[in-house]
Image (tube, rainbow, N blue to C red):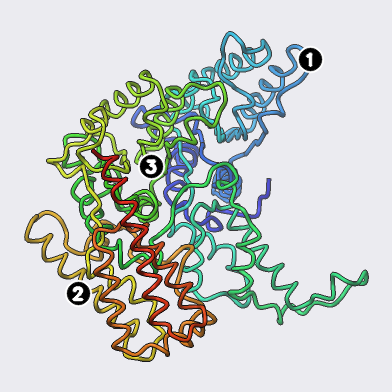
């Protein structure tokens, strides 16, 4: 374990460092305070969370802090597998030796990394060696005196595999969860890793990079910085890969730039994405005109339904409860599936400081031989362990008819048992109208308290602001600024309408963000503004369109797409975009034909949808 990093070399874990100091360092350094008030100092602390989130790093930094304190504190570190032996009784003897050494060198901290390998859950199928080890560890921790000045710390990413007898006060007094870092924590971690660079990237670029690395843990960000340096070396000294002799590398010429970090990001797969990819992304610049108003209204609903400290990563939990009679929950429904494709992931992006647990059709059936109700119970237990947390159930109707009656009853009963004192936000999406939701699901959400939100189809102004992006590069008076001004006027109109209808709901997303602490910036992930080459293509064809033709096309598009879903509008946009890229003599006629053909296809499909609904 490296001993050259203290707490100042750790970013994004200020709360965890404060708790570790209160639970570990203070009782060892100021034991007389506990003795004066006849308090029992804590004996154990358990770190758990996803791999690479800093559990072992905090323990190693704690060892450095202990050695630099006024009162010397010894530190003993062991892996869970170090105590195992093939000889009978040898494993228990190694464990006793560790505690004996701690008694001789107290005050002392004992750190067990990967403690799930040392003290797994005892059961009828468990072998004798592990059962005896767990019993020995329980006896040794119980044998510590109140003033023994010995603290035991364990770290694991499989907390369910630890024997429940260890998880109580007197043994492991507190369990500390290490989540994936949020936007602010990722920015701090990146700043720590580039702290000693001579030519540092700009803070503005670090903020952009932090917004692009959703789902990256601390180890991933460290690997990203290392890979960016190697990309810079490959870019400046490509000859070192073709020669066996050593070349002199001038570190002054190595300036890690934006292109190096972007290339490194493509070469790294985050640890969390290797298991399951969470659908977390912000609204892209392209679809913002269509869905920004819906996202604003949903965020304002959450401001009413959720406690303020739950939406704000800076506040402390436990100040107030939800204004609803249930735990915070919201159901996004509507025939437009934009709530599952765009709005749900955008909400997860705004609330990324909350640990996210996803219950979808993949997580229900990912393990062969496990019943669906068992998967639901395990997912709910995991969400309740990391409160405040977020449970995301996308497209619940996709698996509702696949599972049996027992799984449905288990799901509804678990959700119904969550009262307002539990800080768990449940976001559910259903691709159907609000009156078509199955009664078992509908009864879980109170429509009168604003827990049901039906996504409406984009209105004419939103559709116009969406399709006007096709002609933004034209020099005929249709500019991107005009499009944004039109969208801003639409937002202001929607804001005034919401204020008139509800006094408690905020009218603007920016105002809501400033009060709740939700993410203010909306940096796109995935789709973005057109590239320079695409702008040149658009300009060459859109220059053939006059301002009057552009206005006429926009009028036809807006009129023909009445009551269309966002998915249909995006498909039409892609078709018109391809038409605009091609070289036609009469661009206006080609785009008009494309619009007519696409509209005819939609009109043919609409009677089938109506028959299915009836």
Within 10 Å of disc 2 (Cα), the crowding (few <14, some 14-19, many 20+) is few
Please tell me which residue is depicted at 35% across the width and 68% down the height of the picture: 596
Please tell me which residue is depicted at 44% across the width and 52% down the height of the picture: 280
Of the two numbered discs 1 and 3 in the rendering, the one whose residue sits closer to the viewer: 3
Please tell me which residue is depicted at 70% across the width and 78% down the height of the picture: 254
Say left or right for 108 vs 567.
right
The image quarter in which residue 604 lies: bottom left
Q: Where the N terminus falls, by quadrant?
A: top right
Residue at the limit of the structure toward the top, as seen here = 124
Mark 3 or mark 1, which is nearer the start of the sequence?
Answer: 1
- Does any portion of residue 503 appear in the rendered image? yes
Q: Where the C terminus falls, by quadrant?
A: top left
x and y percent of residue 357 in the render?
Answer: 42, 39
Residue at the limit of the structure toward the right, as seen here = 244
Which circle marks residue 394 in the picture?
3
Which circle marks residue 87 in the picture?
1
Which circle marks residue 565 in the picture?
none
Q: Which residue is mark 2?
A: 489
SS category of the residue bearing label 2: helix
Within 10 Å of disc 3 (Cα), the crowding (few <14, some 14-19, many 20+) is many
x and y percent of residue 499 in the render?
Answer: 10, 61
SS category of the residue bearing label 3: loop
The image quarter in which residue 250 lies: bottom right
Q: Against 456, is 524 above or below? A: below
x and y percent of residue 261 in the render?
Answer: 60, 68
Q: Nearer the viewer, residue 606 or 169?
A: 606
SS category of the residue bearing label 1: loop
């Amino acid at each position: 374990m490296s001993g050259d990093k203290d707490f100042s070399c750790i970013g994004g874990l200020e709360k965890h460092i404060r708790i570790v100091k209160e639970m570990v360092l203070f009782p060892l350094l100021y034991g007389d305070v506990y003795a004066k008030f006849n308090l029992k100092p804590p004996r154990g602390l358990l770190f758990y969370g996803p791999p690479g989130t800093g559990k072992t790093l905090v323990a190693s930094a704690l060892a450095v802090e202990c050695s630099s304190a006024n009162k010397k504190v010894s530190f003993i570190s062991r892996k869970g597998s170090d105590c195992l032996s093939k000889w009978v009784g040898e494993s228990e003897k190694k464990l006793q030796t560790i505690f004996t050494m701690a008694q001789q060198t107290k005050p002392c901290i004992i750190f067990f990394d990967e403690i799930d390998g040392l003290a797994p859950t005892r059961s009828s199928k468990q072998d004798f060696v592990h059962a005896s080890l767990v019993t020995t560890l329980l006896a040794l921790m119980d044998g510590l005196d109140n003033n023994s000045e010995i603290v035991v710390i364990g770290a694991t990413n499989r907390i369910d595999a630890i024997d429940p007898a260890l998880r109580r006060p007197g043994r492991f007094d507190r369990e500390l969860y290490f989540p994936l870092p949020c936007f602010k924590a990722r920015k701090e971690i990146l700043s720590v890793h580039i702290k000693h660079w001579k030519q540092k990237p700009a803070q503005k670029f670090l903020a952009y990079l932090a917004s692009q690395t959703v789902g990256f843990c601390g180890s991933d960000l460290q690997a990203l910085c290392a890979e960016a340096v190697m990309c810079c070396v490959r870019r400046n000294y490509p000859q070192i890969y073709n020669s066996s002799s050593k070349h002199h590398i001038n570190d002054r010429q190595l300036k890690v730039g934006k292109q190096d970090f972007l290339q490194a990001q493509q070469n790294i797969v985050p640890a969390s994405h290797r298991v399951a990819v969470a659908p977390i992304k912000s609204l892209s610049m392209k679809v913002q005109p269509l869905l920004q108003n819906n996202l604003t209204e949903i965020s304002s609903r959450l401001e009413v339904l959720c406690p303020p400290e739950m939406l704000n990563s800076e506040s402390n939990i436990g100040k107030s409860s939800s204004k609803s009679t249930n735990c915070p929950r919201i159901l996004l429904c509507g025939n437009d599936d934009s709530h599952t494709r765009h709005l749900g992931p955008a909400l997860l992006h705004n609330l990324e400081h909350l640990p996210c647990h996803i219950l979808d059709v993949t997580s229900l059936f990912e393990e062969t031989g496990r019943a669906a109700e068992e998967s639901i119970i395990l997912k709910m237990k995991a969400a309740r362990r990391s409160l405040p947390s977020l449970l995301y159930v996308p497209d619940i109707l996709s698996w509702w008819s696949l599972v049996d009656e027992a799984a449905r009853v288990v799901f509804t009963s678990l959700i119904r048992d969550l009262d307002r004192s539990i800080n768990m936000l449940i976001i559910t999406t259903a691709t159907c109208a609000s009156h078509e939701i199955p009664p078992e699901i509908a009864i879980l959400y109170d429509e009168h308290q604003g827990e049901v939100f039906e996504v409406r189809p984009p209105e004419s102004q939103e559709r116009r602001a969406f399709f006007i992006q096709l002609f933004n590069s034209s020099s005929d008076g249709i500019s991107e600024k005009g499009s944004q001004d039109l969208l801003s006027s639409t937002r202001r109109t929607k804001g005034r309408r919401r204020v008139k209808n509800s006094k408690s709901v905020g009218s603007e997303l920016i105002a809501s963000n400033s009060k709740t602490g939700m993410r203010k910036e909306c940096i796109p992930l995935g789709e973005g503004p057109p590239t320079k080459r695409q702008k040149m293509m658009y300009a060459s064809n859109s220059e053939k369109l006059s301002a009057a033709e552009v206005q006429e096309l926009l009028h036809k598009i807006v009129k023909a797409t009445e009551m269309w879903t966002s998915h249909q509008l995006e498909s039409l946009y892609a078709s018109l975009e391809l038409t605009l890229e091609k070289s036609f003599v009469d661009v206006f006629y080609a785009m008009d034909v494309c619009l007519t053909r696409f509209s005819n296809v939609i009109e043919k499909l609409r009677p089938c949808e109506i028959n299915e609904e009836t």
